[in-house]
Amino acid sequence: MASYASASFMLLLLLQLWSCSEALPRGHPVDPTCPPEWSSVVAMSSNHGKPPSCQPPAPHIPVAVFPYDVDPMQFATNLEFTEAEFFLHGAYGVGLDEIAPKLALGGPPSVGSRKANLDEVTWRIVAEFGLQEVGHIRAIQRTVGGIPRPLIDLSPHNFARVMDEAFGYKLDPPFDPYVNSLNFLLASYVIPYLGLNGYVGTNPIIDGYETKKLLAGLLGVEAGQDAVIRALLFERRGEAVPPYNITVAEFTDRVSALRNRLGRCGVKDEGLTVPRELGAEGVLCTNVLSADRDSLSYARTPAELLRILYLTGDEHVPGGFYPEGANGRIARSFLGK
């Protein structure tokens, strides 16, 4: 009876959402709280004299996409798929199969993900991030072609496993990312930062001007998403996460240490607090952004990322968020060894 009531309640919520929304061609729900059309100050422009130049200079190497650009950028789609499914389900209770089904390219739906119990501010942030990921996948596919969505495990059980491994013991009750806003933000700390690392690592090995333009645009937004997540958690860094009596800062420190351990390539990850010598210019022990001694973002290779996302510490052994392995030539090449 309880499960029937819960299902009925969720159905009612979805009906209310869609009843006050207008579906866009790709299925995106339109925010009913948006004001009516008006002449936005942002959109206003004044062209005095000759028309301004709005195009960048011609590229030094006039090749849009080199053949060797394709695989690294397609590899990144694995993480974009994961973020899209996590954020979309967290905000709307549905994923790509409802919002933009063609982008999945026939890949299986994610498992275990569901609508999170979010406050209004967190919901708006998560919803925006989810829709941004849809654009990211579309842009990658348009520029270098796509790969099918891999099987992605976003279940509470999988996130509980991450936290248990981070702390070295089983949390009681098991960690559930979908029960409230704070837990969802802590779960959001687990994956998106890795996309940022991957793009920083990919930048030196691509050359096409369209590929570089794509990567720069993706990196800018991924870094922004990570900064928002970290800033929201930073505000609550001294707060205990119920019912564990463990602070937000310790959760982030433990997750970062786990990712460093699984990545097996030294320190490329830092929580919200660090030893002072690792802080900005060796002065601060608070750490809003994760960066090296020169305050530059850390880079990770596909192999490092897979070791972390598989939760196995081995790019050849799938598991974790990708039970059957990630997709694309790079990821599948490791599975054949």
Image: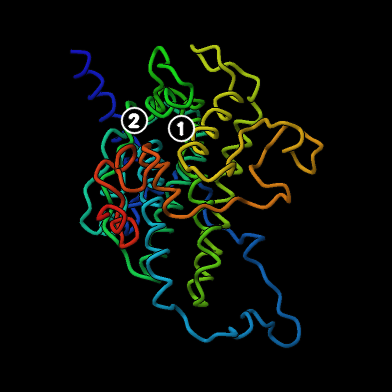
**Classed neighbour count for the residue bearing mark 1: other residues with Cα under 10 Å, few (<14), some (14–19), many (≥20):** many
Q: Quadrant of residue 145?
A: bottom left
Q: Secondary structure at mark 2?
A: helix
Give the foreground label among 2 and 1.
Answer: 2
N-term-proximal mark, 2 vs 1:
2
**Number of numbered discs visible in the structure rendering:** 2
Q: Secondary structure at mark 1?
A: helix
Say whether residue 6 is left or right of residue 205: left
Residue furthest right in the image: 283
Q: Percent position (x, y) of residue 133?
A: 43, 52
Q: Percent position (x, y) of residue 101?
A: 26, 54
Residue toward you, 176 or 161: 161
Q: Are marks 2 and 1 in contact (CB under 8 Å)?
A: no
Amino acid type shown at disc 1: Ala
Amino acid type shown at disc 2: Asn
Residue toward you, 190 or 232: 190
**Classed neighbour count for the residue bearing mark 2: other residues with Cα under 10 Å, few (<14), some (14–19), many (≥20):** some
Q: Percent position (x, y) of residue 237?
A: 64, 25
Residue under label 2, please give it: 158
67 up-or-down from 273: above or below:
below
Residue under label 1, please give it: 187
41 up-or-down from 117: above or below:
below
